[in-house]
Image (tube, grey):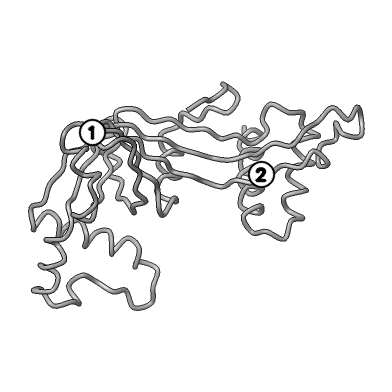
Amino acid sequence: MYTPAAFRQDDLATLHQQMRATRLPTLVSHGAQGLLASHLPLLLEADEGPHGTLYGHFARANPQWRDLAEGSPALVIFQGAEAYISPSWYAAKAEHGKVVPTWNYISVQAHGRAEVFDDAERLLQLVSRLSAQHEAERPQPWAVSDAPRDYIDSMLRAIVGFALPIERLEGKWKLGQNRSQADQNGVREGLHASHDPRDHELAAQINNQHLAKEAP
């Protein structure tokens, strides 16, 4: 990922936080079948390895797992907040007009090679934990154990799991850090004034960055 120094994020806890916040990352691999991509909910075990380990599963009918089983490298993309940035928000527009649009965003990319498995008990543990993670805030969380075991067993035979130790982790927080404080303030105000909640999310990230810089 092209990451100028001003936008680089190296703090592991911050990277892991964004990874957990991305509900449906994209796993990309290149193998005998060419480029393949799947959108998968994942579990992050932060303490397994220097950068953590990702766990997930494919439908058995999805050919991508076969490439991973053969050792193909994988890239997992965790897309965070993003928004179009209008030049009209920059203070520099009124000063000299030499401004153009851009797109600000947060992204984390994890690289590694996966171990593929289809052991029923290991798969059961994985899908149970994934379900618990996404059901946690519901008033009456559903659990895998709520379904008949023979039905769950048949579902487990239809999937293939994987563990992906992260060998390299990259973070890019492109939030206008390369612009003047007046321009950054204008962007934050412009995003706050937007009717799109996605713009508000990025504005909050810019604000958090501003507060972090001011902290003693």
Residue 32 numbered mark, or none: 1
- Disc 2 crowd, CA 10 A, few/some/many (<14, 14-19, 20+): some
* Residue occupying image coordinates x 47% and y 28%: 1
- The furthest residue to the right: 95
- Residue 58 position (above or below residue 138): above
Q: Quadrant of residue 97?
A: top right
* Residue occupying image coordinates x 77% and y 55%: 193
- Disc 1 crowd, CA 10 A, few/some/many (<14, 14-19, 20+): few
- Amino acid found under the numbered disc labelled 1: Ala
Q: CA distance from mark 2 to mark 1?
A: 45 Å
Is 177 displayed left or right of 138 in the figure? Answer: right
Q: Quadrant of residue 121?
A: bottom left
Q: How far from the left and from the top, in percent, is residue 207?
A: 66, 44
Q: How far from the left and from the top, in percent, is residue 2?
A: 52, 25
Is 21 displayed left or right of 154 in the figure? Answer: right
- Residue 148 position (above or below residue 71): below
Is 162 displayed left or right of 17 in the figure? Answer: left
Which residue was labeled with disc 2? Answer: 207
- The furthest residue to the front: 33
* Residue occupying image coordinates x 29% and y 28%: 167
- Numbered disc 1: secondary structure: loop
Q: How far from the left and from the top, in percent, is residue 9?
A: 50, 30
* Residue occupying image coordinates x 53% and y 27%: 8
- Residue 141 position (above or below residue 97): below
Q: How far from the left and from the top, in percent, is residue 31?
A: 25, 33
- Numbered disc 2: secondary structure: helix
Mark 2 vs mark 1: in front: 1
Quadrant of the frame with the C terminus: top right
Is 187 displayed left or right of 21 in the figure? Answer: right
- Amino acid found under the numbered disc labelled 2: Asn
